[in-house]
Amino acid sequence: MEGTKYSRPTEPSLEDRMIAETVCSAVSAAGLGIAAVTAYRRRFLTAARIAAYSLVPIGLVMTGVVEWLADTAFSPVAWAGFAVLGVAWVLFMTTRAVERRRGGTRKERKAARAAAQRDAVAPEASAPSLGQASRPAARPEPGPAKASRGGDDDFSDIEAILKKHGI
């Protein structure tokens, strides 16, 4: 066995890389052809966009990203790493969705609840009124019926709006 060359099973062969590079080159050539036809039809903005997209695969081949992907595609450890990253992403997005649904973090909800209890009743409202000074100066005399009805109508609209919003 000294004369035979032994390759590791996780290492991709040269043929795999060459196939990937050939496919990327073909995709780029086809995209540039479609861009040329689109430009011939005088849709230059679309043609430029198609040309940009079609140059990406050949650029990836030239920078070595395709070789790295070919190495990664045949590595079980790399796929396990992608699976772990996927699980982490799903957990992160699930916790964010639950947090948004509840309305913030636990500390924020606790602080909001305490503030709502504290501000539910103003301190002056719970104090007893003892003398003439704390009472209103005088009751306004009732005006004509039409004027009071018009004022009540305005307040009823406002009350309806407030009730609609839960205030």
Image: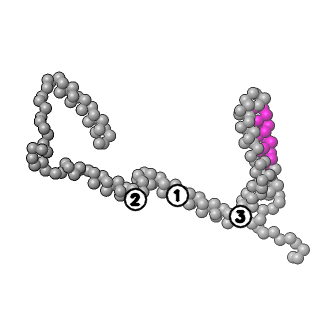
> Mark 2: which amino acid?
Arg
Picture disc at residue 6: none
Q: Give the spatial CA distance, label 1 vs label 3.
A: 26 Å
Earlier residue among tags 1 and 3: 3
Q: Are marks 2 and 3 in contact (CB under 8 Å)?
A: no
Could you tell me the amino acid type at mark 3?
Answer: Ser
Label 1 Cα neighbours within 10 Å, binned few <14 / some 14-19 / many ≥20? few
Task: Say which residue label 3 marks.
Answer: 75
Asked which secondary structure carries label 2, the reply is helix
> Percent from the top left, x then y, of residue 133?
12, 44
Question: In the figure, residue 113 lies in which quadrant?
Answer: bottom left
Residue found at the very far left of the displayed protein = 131
Where disc 3 sits, the SS reads loop
Indicate whether 145 appears above or below 96. Answer: above
The quarter of the picture where residue 156 lies is top left
Residue drawn at x 64%, y 63% as measured from the top left: 81
Say which residue label 1 marks.
92
Q: Do the residues labelled 1 and 3 touch (CB within 8 Å)?
A: no
What is the secondary structure assignment of the residue under circle 1?
helix
Q: Quadrant of the C terminus?
A: top left
Q: Which of marks 2 and 3 is in front?
A: 2
Viewer-proximal residue among 166 and 28: 166
Q: Is residue 25 magenta?
A: yes
The residues colored magenta run 23-38
Q: How far apart are marks 2 and 3 (CA)?
A: 42 Å
Closer to the chain start, of discs 2 and 3, is 3
Q: Where is residue 13 in the image (x, y as percent from the top left)?
A: 81, 62
Q: How far apart are marks 2 and 1 (CA)?
A: 17 Å
Of discs 1 and 3, which sits in the foreground? 1
Kind of residue indicated by mark 1: Phe
Quickly name the residue at label 2.
Answer: 106
